[in-house]
Amino acid sequence: MQICRSVEEVRRLRPAMKAMGFVPTMGFLHEGHLSLVRQAAAENDTVAVSIFVNPLQFDSAADLDHYPRAVERDLALLEKEGVDLVFLPTAELLYPPGFATRVEVGGVADRLEGPARPGHFSGVATVVAKLFNILQPQQAYFGRKDAQQCAVISRMVHDLNLPVEVVTAPTFRESDGLAASSRNARLTPAQRRQAPALYQALEAARQAFSEGERNRARLEALMTRTLAEQLGENAPDAEGRRAWETDYATIVDPDTFVPSETLGEEALALLAVRLGEVRLIDNMLLNSASISAGRDSSSPDY
Ligand SMILES: Nc1ncnc2c1ncn2[C@@H]1O[C@H](COP(=O)(O)OP(=O)(O)OP(=O)(O)O)[C@@H](O)[C@H]1O
Ligand SMILES: CC(C)(CO)[C@@H](O)C(=O)[O-]
Ligand code: BAL
């Protein structure tokens, strides 16, 4: 496994590597990331992974500071997966003094996570465009846990004619339904026990949708109610902070991320919930064929 810390090293090695599947990550790898790596390996001659906690996409200094990191452990996991190349840039390498360019995606990036995390999608699009240019993969893999990110990257690739195919992969879930996420490591044991509430709320919406419910307000209310039931008591603490807050619990059109007035045969349920200082997101595709089964990556999630 080649570990590259400079653009020059990648440029030197890349010509000898055949069709490449690329998995961009922020590290602290879990089974969700590894499922993307395995899919990339199955579908390409070579696999590259980047590990970079991208400061440009964090709107909160505390979130950036507390983002979990474990590079040596990550490298051992990737070695075991047979990854060919790992790109490990620093912020100084990708954003040297004088760096002044941003990729701004409109439309889908202006909704939900866009206003909730100002500058986030611009930071994601900018770093992903740079990583694509450096690694020049044929295919790039993104997890549908970050459904809106998948849509933003696909928009950018299409709009800028970038020569890469975006592949989206199902959400890997823990056995209790919680979507694997690096930020889960920051949950207290009590919050970790509560966290499957997101999955249960999505599952409630999927069940109702599969039974014919097409009223958006009722589906959203069902998710909100399920969250409250599962997360329980929400009295403010001495500092006035609540134990949990729902940022959004909504149903949108899966292509545009606009809340659909009338729901057809397919819709996307999305949640963002704060448990203490940790903000979790999750989503589930609702369609008329959806059945209430499966918590693993084989379930028909978005
Ligand atoms: N549970 C999961 N299943 C499938 N893909 C995932 C999962 N979690 C993350 N990914 C994907 O892995 C890639 C890298 O994500 P990232 O390094 O931000 O991890 P993360 O677990 O999403 O961390 P966090 O959400 O805490 O930032 C993204 O494409 C992301 O969608
Ligand atoms: C795609 C990505 C690696 C860009 O920093 C990040 O947003 C992530 O890990 O999902
Ligand atoms: N997994 C999405 C990257 C982020 O939350 O910043």
Image (cartoon, rainbow, N blue to C red):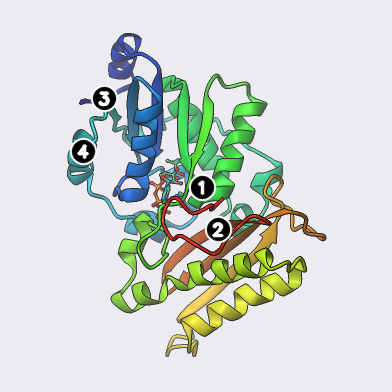
| Mark 1 CB within 8 Å of ligand 1 | yes
Res 85 → quadrant: top left
Q: Position of residue 277 (x, y in %)?
A: 41, 70
State the separation of the CA atoms marked 4 and 1: 24 Å
Which kind of residue does numbered mark 3 sit on?
Asp
| Sequence-first tag of 3 and 2 | 3
Q: CB at mark 3 closer than 8 A to ligand 1? A: no
Query: For the residues marked 4 and 3, what is the alpha-carbon distance in whole angstroms?
Result: 11 Å
Residue 91 shows in the view: no
| Front residue of 141 and 236 | 141
Determine which residue is flagged by label 4.
75
Foreground mark, 4 or 3, reads 3
Q: Which residue is mark 1?
A: 144
Question: Where does the image place residue 239, in percent across and percent down from the top left?
Answer: 44, 85
The reply to whether dot 4 and dot 2 touch (C-beta < 8 Å) is no
Question: Which amino acid, by three-letter code, is at mark 2?
Answer: Asn
Where disc 4 sits, the SS reads helix
Can you tell which quarter of the image residue 26 is in? Answer: top left
The kind of secondary structure element at disc 1 is: helix
Q: Residues within 10 Å of mark 2 (few under 14, many from 20)?
A: many
Which label sits on residue 283?
2
Expressed as whole percent of the image width and height from the top left, the position of residue 254 reads 67, 49
Q: Nearer the viewer, residue 179 or 110?
A: 179
Q: Determine which residue is flagged by label 3.
A: 84
Nearest the eye: 143 or 159: 143
Q: Which mark is residue 107?
A: none
